[in-house]
Image: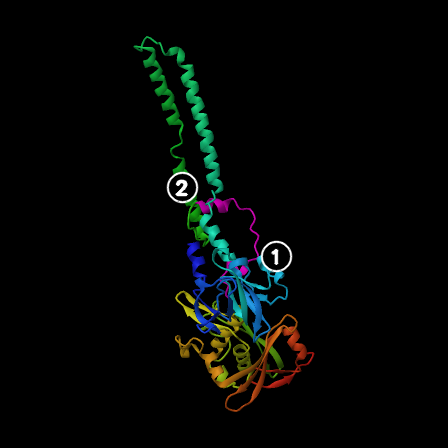
Amino acid sequence: NSLDALKKMQPKLATVLRQDDDGRDEWIPRFDSAELVPGDLIKVKVGDSVPADAYVTDLLSSAILSVDESALTGESASVSKEALDDMGGYDSGPVAEQVGTLFAGTMITKGKAEALVAKTGSTTEIGKIQKGVVTAEIAKTPLTVKLDKFGDDLALLIAGICAAVWLISIPRFDDPSFESVFEGAVYYTKVAVSLGVAAIPEGLPAVITLVLALGTRRLAEQNVIVRNLPSVETLGCVSIIATDKTGTLTTNQMTVVALVTLDRNEKGTFMLEHSIEGETYEPIGKVEGMRSDEISFYSTGAISDVMAVSLGCNDAQLIKKSDGFSIIGEPTEGALLTLAEKLGTSDDEVDKVMLDKSRQMWHEQWERYATLDFDRNRKSMSILCRDKNTKVERLLVKGAPNLLLERCTHAKLRDGTVVEITPDL
């Protein structure tokens, strides 16, 4: 249920700064998050779930700290955080506007930071949601409200009719067919009660259930899953659905669906789009119109460079769970990582135990020794890497095409040929 799902979002461990027996400060990497108190200094990194509401005090080894706050705000896009100079600015505004605060239960998708614990337990934003779930009252559906009102009105009407029938029958209490007036009163009371019982619509619940069941069947024909019958009636009362929560309503998994390459034939240079199979983070899928050994056949080709950028300019990790595949990090980087795995191995060579085979092979060969993180102005991420064997250095960049193309003078074709970027191209 909802309460269990919220509990699973709470991390059990945290990295906290505490004093040892000698009074020296030391970082404790696997500290019980339930024992955190306001004033503790914690450290978070990519993939960590924030253990408590905390104020960002310092960004470590990165100019950017991104957090997935979809559990609180419903927005699938990660939010950038920063350390504020004024402590009074941390709690200002709604959750979505607090750029200096980390909230319990949210996930770090990029960067590292130190933060000062401000709230724990039920005082956190996620704790308030848990309290709301526990104390929430189940609202009645529109049909239930109407049936309750109909039942109350019908009860008053029946009671009025029964009372009127009994009052009209008072002159007949002393009818000769009765031995006494009391016996006549009892008789007509039974008549009034019988009339009231007969007026109760006993078949109404069965009719309502049948109508809702027919509605469920019609929805099932449209591939709509209905968990309980009242939801059919509630949906029938909806006239307008307004939403922009595509990441929340869908699987919230970004995938690369097409790859465009430059190729050449006797007629000249042209662009070719390759469709890519798969709609999840599962690293298995064919790329239309591309060789299974593309990377080894064109070792210096464009696809090899696409794979290098997807793996090098990437801080995400691919993991396998019982219900499928997921990532730790930014959804965009997760999509590129999945693409690289699809490009790097053919279906026959996929090692389902070693999910990130291409990623591990790249990091075994290349050393990433400098990183310029993505920011709003550059709209790109750059890394410097060095081949561990040949010591050859490369600059790999990913970012917005319109800004990157302004800095480019040449383009690489699929077979590795480098051509000049002309107005016609």
Residue 310 is labelled as none
The quadrant in which the C terminus is found is bottom right
Task: Report helix, strand or loop for mark 2.
Answer: helix
Q: Nearer the viewer, mark 2 or mark 1?
A: 1
Boundaries of the magenta span? 230-253
Quadrant housing residue 201: top left
In the image, residue 327 above or below residue 212: below
Most distant residue in the top direction: 176
Most distant residue in the bottom direction: 390
In the image, residue 418 above or below residue 144: below
Q: Which residue position is annotated with label 2?
A: 210
Is residue 249 one of those drawn in magenta? Answer: yes
Task: Report helix, strand or loop for mark 1.
Answer: loop
Q: Where is residue 341 in the image (x, y as percent from the top left)?
A: 47, 76
Mark 2 surroundings within 10 Å by alpha-carbon count, few (fewer than 14), some (14 through 19), many (20 or more):
few
Quadrant housing residue 154: top left
Query: What residue appears at the point 57 percent right and 66 percent down from the top-left corner?
Result: 56
Residue 347 in view: yes
User: Would you say 181 lies left or right of 240 here?
Assistant: left
Is residue 164 one of those drawn in magenta? Answer: no
Query: What residue appears at the point 59 percent right and 64 percent down from the top-left corner?
Result: 100
Q: Which residue position is annotated with label 1?
A: 93
Pick whichever, 383 or 345, lies toward us.
383
